[in-house]
Amino acid sequence: MTYKLLLVEDNEIVAQATSEALKRQGFKVDSASDAESADTLINHTQYDMILLDLMLPGIDGSDFLRELRKISDLPIIITSAKDGEVDKAVNLELGADDYITKPISTIELVARIKAVLRRAQGNKKTMKVLWHQDVKINTEAHEVYKSNEIVPLTAKEYDILKLFFENPNNVFTKRQIYTQVWHDDYYIDENIINVHIRRLRKKIETHPSSPTLIVTVWGVGYKLGKK
């Protein structure tokens, strides 16, 4: 399995050297130079881990970690020139999975990454996160987020969205949606599906009148849009 990492580092030389070293070890690596760029990438790409520098321009790395932990259990390793037991304790309490001090040894970094990923894989038995575009479903907590903001959905809206996320290549007719979500074969009024799809789009689409997440397949039904 090839793991995808996000390296958040404002020093271009360090970022390039670290990225190239990790790619040579078989990892896929994206880079961001600040918290805002990292947030954009996280909302549109599914990563296995984040390597986060603390000393970032704009939003501080610790603040970014604190906000990220409110909505994600994604494994995070802090990389920083700061040292000392106090710094390590503070950042681990904020939700980091590990801490490595610069200058970074590639051998040590790879060993730490693999160790954290092994622990994360063991924890995935009770945690399932579904991503598409800038929307995420935490199926354990039954919560939906758009651009890191929680979206309040009704039970049926949640079930419809989850149905599409779990079957990204399927086109569903209105009858199939009703059968899957209402668990009832007695399907009469297709308007019930129209109403729920319309309300769901208002909550999760950036432009509900031009949906890109749940799209209409004319004459058939609905499907999940492209990433």
Image (tube, rainbow, N blue to C red):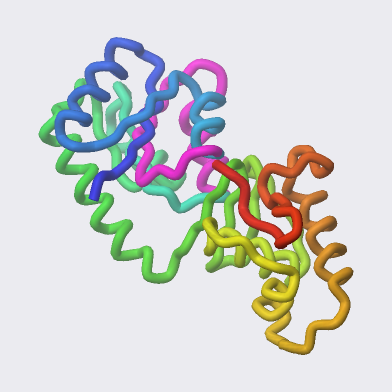
**Residue 110 in sight:** yes
The total number of labels drawn is 0
- At a point 34% along the width and 37% down the height, the residue shown is 5
View extreme (left): residue: 107
Residue 90 placement: quadrant: top left
Q: Is residue 129 left or right of residue 83?
A: right
Q: Is residue 184 left or right of residue 163?
A: right
The residue most toward the front is 219
Tell me what residue is drawn at x 26 percent, y 50 percent: 116
Q: Residue at x 69, y 80 (%)?
A: 179
User: Foreground residue, 8 or 89?
Assistant: 8
Residue 208 lies in the magenta stretch: no
Tell me: 99 left or right of 166.
left
Residue 219 location, x and y as percent? 75, 59
- Name above or below for residue 109 compared with residue 180: above
Find the magenta span and give its range.
Answer: 44-70
Residue 129 vs residue 70, the one in the foreground: 129
The image shows residue 114 at horizontal and vertical percentages of 20, 47
Which quadrant is the C terminus positioned in?
Answer: top right
Closer-to-camera residue (158/68): 158
Q: Is residue 48 part of the magenta span, yes or no?
A: yes
- Depth check: 215 or 41 in front? 215
The answer to whether one can see residue 87 in this image is no
Query: In terms of image quadrants, where is residue 15?
Result: top left
Residue depicted at 84% across the width and 72% down the height: 190
Query: Residue 217: image x %, image y %?
Result: 70, 54
